[in-house]
Image (cartoon, rainbow, N blue to C red):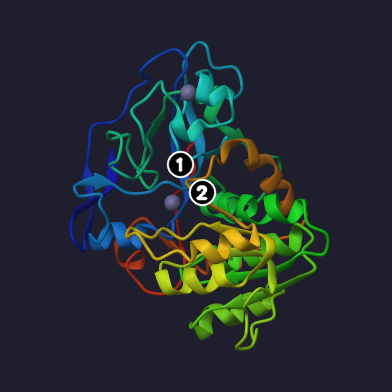
């Protein structure tokens, strides 16, 4: 089978790899049919992250199930499923406590498409093994467009969790989204609106993304003075100074969800935050429990993820499309079941 492999900084190609097999009675083999680029992927390809090549790329997809082990009960051959980015057993103490991102049954950081906790394959590959199929896979409801939820594995669900958690406990929340990565900021605008925000402002240097945020329901001219103006800030930027500005924009009692990955240790205005009694949450997202909600939001038209994924390409065109600037991209493959 073929996998899309990062070979070195800026070098991405389809290469032959051994076909994965069922490793146990609880595992499944799946074939990705709609794989999305995560906002991290372009940087992984460019070689500017701590994760060094070679490795198979991709950790967002909808796949068709090809084969399941004897003990798998929730899916069968031919089902369409969302495949979460994180490998997790669903049964260890951490998983049962809702912290699948810290699953102890596998190496720390075990995930698709990122060589941080071993190599588990990438979700652009032709075939992928899912070792804990019942715990991980989420079947798509009938009629849901696989392309629209290709990103439920990571970015789309991350945006929902980052927005909905703080908004759920604040009436008429005034929300500021600090954009800067390809899709997360605009997705966060859509999810903030869906979660019932009172207002959503969007801050970003990119005219392209500001136009998408405007279409998603944000005010994109928030003005110069942001300080202490927002109950909720969603920081989807890699720029430490933009994060800093977002933190200063928190009103007393506010909450900042930081979902843009910053590899450095940025300056945090901690004393001012202390005096305002604010919360900063940062961390990888445990997507699996929230994917059914995200399916409902997309199915009912309350968010439109395809707005940030205008490029849909074949496998052949994927290496070129994945290094192009601006937008999230979806790679499609024919079904065989
Ligand atoms: Zn990701
Ligand atoms: Zn576990």
Distance Cα–Cα, label 2 vs label 1: 6 Å
Position of 59 compared to 63: left or right? left
Look at mark 1 in the image and give the residue it sits on: 85
Image position, residue 332 (x, y; %)? 46, 54
In-image side of 65 versus 321 (left or right)? right
Q: Is mark 1 within 8 Å of ligand 1?
A: yes
Q: Is residue 146 left or right of residue 244?
A: right
Residue on which disc 2 sits: 154
Give SS at disc 2: loop
**How dense is the environment of label 2, judged by Cα within 10 Å: few (below 14), some, or many (20 and up)?**
many
Q: Is residue 248 visible?
A: yes
Q: Position of residue 50 (x, y in %)?
A: 25, 52
Sort mark 1 into few (<14), some (14-19) or many (20+) by Cα contacts within 10 Å.
many
How many numbered marks have been drawn onto this rendered protein structure? Answer: 2
Decide if ligand 1 comes within 8 Å of the CB at mark 2: yes
Front position in the image: 169 or 259:
169
* SS at circle 1: loop
CB under 8 Å between discs 2 and 1 = yes
Residue 163 percent across, percent down from the top left? 66, 57
User: Percent from the top left, x then y, of residue 289?
Assistant: 63, 36
Is residue 279 or residue 116 the one in the foreground?
A: 279
């Amino acid at each position: 089978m073929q996998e899309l492999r990062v070979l070195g900084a800026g070098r991405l190609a389809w290469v032959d790899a051994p076909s994965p097999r069922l490793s146990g009675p609880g595992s499944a083999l799946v074939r990705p049919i709609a794989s999305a680029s995560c906002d991290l992927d372009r940087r992984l390809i460019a070689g500017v992250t701590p994760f060094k090549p070679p490795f198979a790329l991709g950790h967002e997809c909808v796949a068709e199930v090809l084969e399941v082990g004897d003990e798998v009960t929730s899916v069968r051959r031919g089902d369409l499923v969302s495949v979460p980015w994180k490998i997790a057993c669903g049964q260890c103490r951490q998983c049962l406590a809702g912290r699948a991102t810290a699953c102890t049954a596998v190496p720390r950081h075990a995930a698709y498409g990122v060589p941080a906790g071993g190599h588990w394959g990438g979700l652009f590959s032709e075939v992928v093994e899912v070792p804990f199929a019942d715990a991980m896979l989420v079947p798509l409801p009938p009629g849901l467009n696989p392309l629209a939820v290709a990103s439920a594995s990571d970015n789309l669900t991350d945006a929902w969790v980052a927005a909905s958690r703080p908004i759920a406990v604040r009436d008429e929340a005034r929300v500021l989204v600090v954009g800067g990565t390809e899709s997360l900021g605009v997705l966060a605008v859509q999810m903030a609106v869906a979660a019932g925000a009172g207002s959503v402002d969007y801050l970003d240097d990119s005219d392209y993304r500001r136009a998408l945020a405007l279409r998603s329901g944000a005010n994109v001219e928030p003005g110069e003075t942001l300080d202490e103006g927002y109950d909720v800030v969603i920081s989807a930027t890699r720029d430490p100074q933009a994060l800093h500005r977002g933190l200063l924009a928190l009103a007393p009692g506010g909450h900042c969800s930081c979902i843009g990955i910053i590899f450095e240790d940025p300056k945090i205005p901690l004393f001012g935050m202390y005096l305002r009694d604010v919360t900063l949450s940062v961390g990888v997202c445990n997507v699996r429990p929230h994917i059914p909600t995200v399916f409902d939001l997309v199915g009912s038209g309350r968010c439109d993820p395809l707005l940030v994924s205008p490029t849909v390409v074949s496998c052949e065109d994927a290496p070129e499309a994945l290094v192009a600037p601006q937008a999230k991209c979806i790679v499609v493959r024919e079904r065989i079941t």
